[in-house]
Amino acid sequence: FEVAVLVTGGAGYIGSHTVAELVEKKEEVIVVDNLEKGHRDAVAGAKLIVGDLRDKEFVKKVFLENDIEAVIHFAAYIEVGESVQNPLKYYNNNVIATLNLLTAMEEAKVDKIVFSSTAATYGEPENIPILETDRTLPTNPYGETKLAVEKALKWCDRAYGIKYIALRYFNASGAHESGEIGEDHSPESHLIPLVIQAALGKRESIKIFGNDYNTPDGTCIRDYIHVSDLANAHYLALQRLREGKESAVYNLGNGKGFSVKEVIDVVRKVTGRPIKVEDAPRRPGDPAVLVASSEKIKKELNWQPRMADLETIVSTAWKWHLSHPNGYNDK
Ligand code: UFG
């Protein structure tokens, strides 16, 4: 019965990299994941409990049967387009399940949580780079559910003393340096893995969603951040909560934007393979430019990205995809 950090969604992409970081830091980790999207093989060095946070009794039981010190909460649906088609699915899993988790935390007197939030809480940005104090006006249910949880956290802090750090990720990408864990979504919708699949010949071409945006080359600009740098931020956030500091919200990005065309060129360079591109219509809800200011987390948590360079990020993703062309199914 050891004191542990509970990681929900720890078998997913960012969750599994955070588990790896915590294990490396000699933390005791318990993962809860329903394995709907996560992969059993992505969890190493931690106990895995398979179950769903929408099941209140299950959540209570996890807290009764384990000595949990703090929670890092990743488990959620993440597809923007799907959230527009089926908002209730998103409210159920991203909001209601999180309320179950907070209820169980309150009952068990667990008072620390690091929460996976997103740049999608901002919607169409007012300023670039985006600051944490900028307007939050999500343009889709996915971002709306994440913002709803941030607000619930604020009130749970005030009422129950549950301290939180919400991390608003920009574009998580890359893979663990070991090449043992990486990105494996089904269906895959993210730019870098899709371009790599095209480089591997697993797909005919990559579609560029819109070439008439108000950007230098007409394609959307995003702030790509290495998943291990994200993972490290969770560890620092946890330490900060252990010091008894106040709740906070932080952006996490590299502060530098790359266009879709620039990303494709970097993948061409790193892989040395030809990649066919195809122009396609804009994807609904895509802002032209999303770039973070991460000055606040650098200053307050002393966070420093180790793999900020896009070529490095893509190289780690390439290493993972080359050794796991079918993702975790290759194991
Ligand atoms: N894109 C293409 N072709 C593709 C896939 C993507 O041109 O086949 C473009 C998109 O239009 C976008 C960029 O590549 O301009 C990046 O798209 P991703 O889907 O990889 O990432 P997003 O920026 O849309 O979304 C990511 C996360 C979301 C999160 C959002 C917040 O996936 O969960 O960042 O910034 F909400």
Image (cartoon, rainbow, N blue to C red):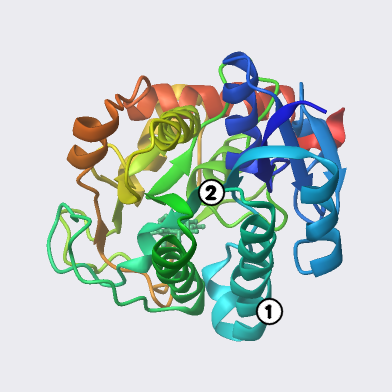
Residue 318 location (% of width, % of height): 57, 26
In the image, 27: left or right of 308? right
Residue 1 location (% of width, % of height): 83, 28
Query: Residue 55, can we see it?
Result: no
On whether ligand 1 comes within 8 Å of the CB at mark 2, the answer is no
Determine crowd level at label 2: few under 14, some 14-19, many 20+ residues with C-alpha closer than 10 A. Answer: many
- As rendered, which of 69 and 168 lies closer to the eye? 69
Secondary structure beneath label 2: loop
Q: Callout 2, which amino acid?
A: Asp
Residue under label 1: 89
Name the residue: 57% across, 77% down.
Answer: 83
- As rendered, which of 268 and 326 lies closer to the eye? 326
Q: Quadrant of ligand 1?
A: bottom left
Q: Nearer the viewer, mark 1 or mark 2?
A: 2
Determine crowd level at label 1: few under 14, some 14-19, many 20+ residues with C-alpha closer than 10 A. Answer: some
Name the residue: 44% across, 51% down.
Answer: 164
Q: Calculate the distance from the C-alpha at mark 1 to the C-alpha at mark 2.
A: 28 Å
Mark found first going from the N terminus, 1 or 2: 1
Q: Which mark is residue 3?
A: none
Q: Classify residue 257 by image quadrant.
A: top left
Q: Callout 1, which amino acid?
A: Lys
In the image, 117: left or right of 40? left
> In the rendered image of this protein, does residue 214 appear above or below residue 248?
below
On whether ligand 1 comes within 8 Å of the CB at mark 1, the answer is no
Query: Residue 199, can we see it?
Result: yes
Secondary structure beneath label 1: helix
Q: Which mark is residue 111?
A: 2
